[in-house]
Image: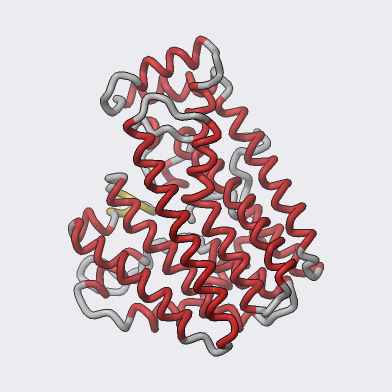
Amino acid sequence: MAGAGSPAAPDSAGLQLLGRAREAIQPELRKAVDRLSDPTRTVAGYHLGWCDRDGYPTAANPGKGIRPALVLACAQAVGGPAEAAYAPAAAVELVHQFSILHDDLMDADATRRGRPTAWAVFGKAQALLAGDALLVLAFRILTELPTPQTEPGCARELSGTLLELVIGQAADLAFEERSEVALDECLAMAGGKTASLFAAACAIGGMAAVADPARVRALRAFGWHLGLSFQLVDDWLGVWGDPRTTGKPVRADLLRRKKSLPVVAALHSGTPAGRRLAELYGRGRPLSDDEAVTAAALVEDAGGRDWVEREAARQKGRAMAELALAEPTPEAADALASLARAARMRDS
């Protein structure tokens, strides 16, 4: 995996930052989820990796927590204390977890991070309700921020992001029923589903530090391009990723005939391999394991792998250029660069 956009080796500094951020926001997350009653509290706790299906504590993988880490790092980047961003970071993480609960159900994903998804364990209705509860808790946190002047901006940022998430998810679902999807449409969908929350996380970090609007705008743009890079790598992993890394079946996206970014790039390549891939995808049913192996080879032969690696690297470069416009402190710039490298690894 030596391509420019392929998943990189772990960045120890970035992983340490992610670990510190997860630890910092745990009290806020626990306090929020404790407001729920059972069974919703248990479903949410299971999804967050805190307990098993019976509510007993467990040490399941909670995900890397890149989004709340971005909130904290961006607050520090513009001179604010990380502590001022703990609550907003928890709100951002709850929105992310809400979206995952619903996405797993809509995509019929039965596993995440190496264990059954919440809907597969507790049923569709309970998983939906738990996702809704996490979303409500996110905005409840924002109404209780200790610095009142930051609450309206943070709430507006998150509510706008949620609209983008809905638009992106609706497009993703629609693509499954369409035979033709343009590459720019696919990039726009990735922007809504993924980049929008990265952008909001970075902007909210700046708001928590009461940064001036120009620096907040630069942080938002940094997050947007970083989020696109993240999604490009995630789509790479959906075709060529190791299940031990992804927590999902090998070639999971291809088995479902998902029109991910490398697939769409291959379908529009005008190559013989791209045409053969279109025939395979046009059969109107999930692919078999053998067909998925063939599809992965066709995507690569059609140039989809090279394209997604180049585009991921290009989006990361744009992200770092936007970060410079925010005039971060040198230490914070290094921290965010480490997070950008860590974001190129799954899981989220």
In-front residue for pair 293/95: 95
Q: Is residue 310 above or below residue 85?
A: above
Q: What is the tally of numbered marks visible in this picture?
A: 0
Quarter containing the N terminus: top right
Q: Position of residue 172 (x, y in %)?
A: 40, 41
Q: Is residue 215 above or below residue 248?
A: below
Q: Position of residue 345 (x, y in %)?
A: 56, 49
Q: Position of residue 272 (x, y in %)?
A: 51, 10
Q: Position of residue 320 (x, y in %)?
A: 74, 53
Q: How is the image coloured?
A: secondary structure
**Residue shown at the point (39%, 54%) measured from the top left:** 113
In-front residue for pair 89/287: 89
In-front residue for pair 71/298: 71
Q: Is residue 133 above or below residue 102?
A: below
Viewer can see residue 229: yes
Identity of the residue furthest to the top in this view: 272
Name the quadrant containing residue 18. bottom right
Left or right: 75 in relation to 152:
right
Left or right: 148 in relation to 26:
right
**Residue shown at the point (22%, 53%) measured from the top left:** 120
Viewer can see residue 16: no
In-front residue for pair 170/73: 170
**Residue shown at the point (59%, 54%) measured from the top left:** 343
